[in-house]
Image (tube, rainbow, N blue to C red):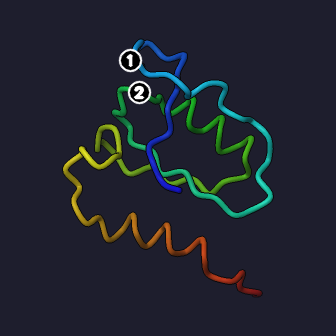
Amino acid sequence: MAGALPDSTGPGFPTTATGFTPVPLKRFAFPSVVVASSDDPYCSLPFAQNCVNAWGSRWIEVGALGHINADSGLGDWEEGGGWLMSLAEPARSS
């Protein structure tokens, strides 16, 4: 699953949006990555970083791209697709 991380308690979160709470804050049993935008009106970087720490996720900050979703204008975002596909790769030993 891919989509923008929502902070349903944040000041910019739409009051009409439902089903986004509570955000689970337990460590995932699978690899995960959080790609965060510095100017996402629905999720602050501190909230996203808190989720990363709780989940054990890989953190990627992409700068000012707004809310990363189908309406963001990123189109066929090859870099994002690459990060998603990296989750399916077997762990590499060093």
Secondary structure beneath label 1: loop
Residue at 67% of width from left, 25% of height from top?
22
Q: Mark 1 = which residue? A: 14
Position of the C terminus by quadrant: bottom right
- The amino acid pointed to by label 1 is Pro
In the depicted structure, whether residue 69 falls above or below residue 31: above
Q: Quadrant of residue 66?
A: top left
Q: CA distance from mark 1 to mark 2?
A: 8 Å
- Please state which of the two labelled residues, at mark 1 or mark 2, is closer to the viewer: 1
Amino acid type, label 2: Tyr
Q: Quick one: label 2, few (<14), some, or many (20+) residues within 10 Å?
A: some
**Most foreground residue, 91 or 45:** 91
- The image shows residue 73, relative to residue 46, as above or below, that is below
- For numbered disc 2, what is the local secondary structure? loop
Which one is nearer the viewer's eye here, 75 or 40? 75
Percent position of residue 50, x then y: 65, 34
Residue bearing mark 2: 42
Asked whether the residues under the numbered discs 1 and 2 touch, taking CB atoms below 8 Å apart as contact, a structural biologist would say yes
Image position, residue 93 (x, y; %): 77, 87
Q: Residue at x 48, y 68 (%)?
A: 83
User: Quick check: 53 above or below 14?
Assistant: below
Q: Which of the two residues, 48 or 68, is positioned nearer the viewer here?
A: 68
